[in-house]
Image: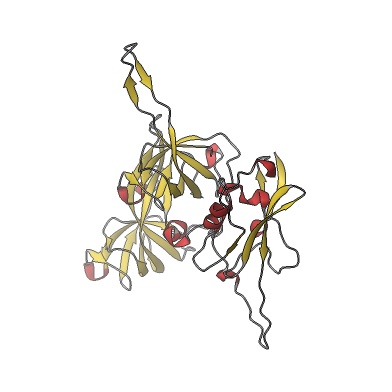
Amino acid sequence: MKKRILGLLGAIVLATQVNADEVQLRADYPDQHVVVKGDTLWDISNTFLNTPWMWPEIWHVNPQIENPHLIYPGDIVRLIYLDGKPRIVIDRVVKLSPNMRVVDEREAIASIPLERINNFLSRSRVVDDGVLEVAPYVVSGEDKRLLTGEGDRVYARGDFDASVAAYGLYRKGQVYKDPKTNEVLGVEATDIASGRMRALDDSVATLALTRSTQEVRIGDRLLQDEERSIESTFYPSAPDVAVDGEIIAVEGGVTQVGKMSVVVLNRGEREGIKVGNVLAIYKRGGEVRDRLKGDIVKLPDEQAGLLMVFRIFEKLSLGLVLEAERPLSTKDLVKNP
């Protein structure tokens, strides 16, 4: 393992030692690609490479370009060879005019479609088993109403920290268990609303609801807002560790998985998973009877898609399916690409 400068977006990460010679180029890669609004880094990587997660290995920073780590609509992406090795370079077309145009960094293309995962980045939470049961809870709505929403007040009871001004309101969702060991990996805390503390009288707090995704009910739990940075840029990478996991759930509680589905994996920070890791999805091989020998034969697992991990917890992680060659489902395997 060695330190590599991850040219893309200027991140410095620990990456598996992979030689640029081992990067697999697509047989039909174009001479160049003009970036358009709506492109993502994954789309462009997939245009040139059979292994899009290897993009950082062949990224070549142009020191003459301001913000060379960011890619904007209108940029021209080209694949060239330097010292016999493939390199991706950017040509930035600058039009001279009397007025200077300032390009906002937020106009740069994203690694993956952020609109598909924004809610999971900012609101989604997975907590340890038992955390919600001991958290403060709603005892009444304004004017003793059973259901309340944004703009209303609610009253909650529990052990509050008077110095905490903002709380999230959650409802217990799915309990995630490892399919092999039956270990509880975490409990989904479904986002319901946000509120600000207005008064605290002994163990009863008055909160003003500043946002709601659905009606707040009696018994909904309150958790302090998380103090963490929100990832908005992801660096595609192969995992540093051997991964042998499984899809244990899909957003919305369904079992079928398709492209751009958000899935839950039974592997997390504890197992060495990192944000940006790309994993291959495998369909389990079935069992057939050998009609000649009479015994049962296990067919091999077959790769059927790719996903990128965009959020990790201690014992599990969330991934976005980027490619799906066949219908996928829960219980499908995830392994190193």
Left-right relation of 1 to 273: right
Front residue of this view, candidates 3 and 296: 296
Residue 43 location (% of width, % of height): 52, 56
Residue 63 location (% of width, % of height): 75, 64
Left-right relation of 35 to 307: right
* Figure coloring: secondary structure
Determine the residue positioned at 58% across, 41% down. Answer: 239
Left-right relation of 204 to 112: left
Residue 77 location (% of width, % of height): 62, 61
Residue 86 location (% of width, % of height): 69, 50
Left-right relation of 10 to 287: right
Front residue of this view, candidates 113 and 169: 113
Determine the residue positioned at 43% across, 34% down. Answer: 302
Front residue of this view, candidates 182 and 9: 9
Question: Can you tell which quarter of the image residue 181 is in?
Answer: top left
Q: Does residue 177 sit above or below 220 in this rendering?
A: above
Is any part of residue 315 visible from this angle? no
Front residue of this view, candidates 111 and 265: 111
Task: State the quadrant of the N terminus.
Answer: top right
Determine the residue positioned at 74% across, 47% down. Answer: 84
**Residue at the bottom extreme?**
98
**Residue at the top extreme?**
293
